[in-house]
Image (tube, rainbow, N blue to C red):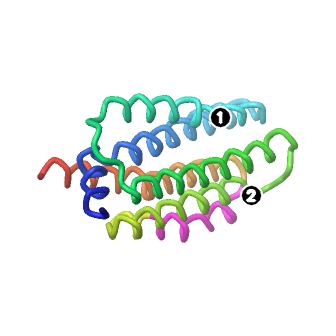
Amino acid sequence: MIRNTQQKLEKGNGAPFLIWGYTTICVSLIVWYLFSATGDPRWNYLWFLILIIGAPVTFLWNRKQVKGVKTYIDKVIGYIWLAFGISGVIVSSVAIFFYWPLPILFIIVLLMGTGVVITGLVIRFKPIVFAGLGGILLSTLCLFVKGVDSILIFAAIFLVMMVIPGHILYYKGRKQ
């Protein structure tokens, strides 16, 4: 079951990691640029583009994949990401709409890093585990780097935590 799930991720070339990782990085850089250039905090509403872009692209990608048996492990990973995704949206929405001064970038990296670690542990794929642990450890940088430049740290962490392991899965999948 675990090997089947790992093979599905590999055959899918780590697409979910790449979709969400690159989407997060691109939106982060857009928000950073616009906020830096104007100083207008309303650009923070653009963070919702991550969900607006990532969810349909993931949905469309999943529809194009060859359907196989959906194992219990596949379902568990789906539920893990659903729970972490909903948590991230709720915390982000509270911070943005109620103007709570939460360390939102730190919280989101911590949440997503934990999801990455759990995914790696469930499928027994060490590069994903280490990438998630790296993300969790690096999340503290978002507490120390203040202001708009913390967004650049956030984007760099997503590179380490999502994009690099996604490419590792891609290359591993191509070899098979």
Q: Quadrant of residue 165?
A: bottom left
Q: Position of 129 compared to 43: left or right?
A: left
The magenta region covers 132-146
Q: Between disc 2 and disc 1, whose residue precedes? A: 1
Q: Position of residue 91 (x, y in %)?
A: 74, 50
Q: Amino acid at mark 1?
A: Phe
Which structural element holds mark 2?
loop
Q: Position of residue 29 (x, y in %)?
A: 55, 38
Identify the mark at residue 48; answer none if there is no mark: 1
The residue nearer to you, when weighing 149 against 117, is 117
Marks 2,1: beta carbons within 8 A:
no
Which quarter of the rendering shows the N terminus? bottom left
Total labels: the figure holds 2
User: Which residue sits furthest left?
Assistant: 175
The residue nearer to you, when weighing 39 against 92, is 92
Q: Residues within 10 Å of mark 2 (few under 14, many from 20)?
A: few
Q: Position of residue 69 (x, y in %)?
A: 30, 47
Secondary structure predominantly adopted by residues drawn in magenta? helix
What residue is drawn where x is 65% and y is 34%?
A: 48
Query: Residue 137 in magenta?
Result: yes
Q: Amino acid at mark 2?
A: Pro
What residue is drawn where x is 38% and y is 35%?
A: 62
Is 133 rendered above or below residue 172? below
Q: Residues within 10 Å of mark 1 (few under 14, many from 20)?
A: some
**Residue at which label 2 appears:** 103
Is 129 rendered above or below residue 103? below
Measure the alpha-carbon separation of dots 2 and 1. 17 Å
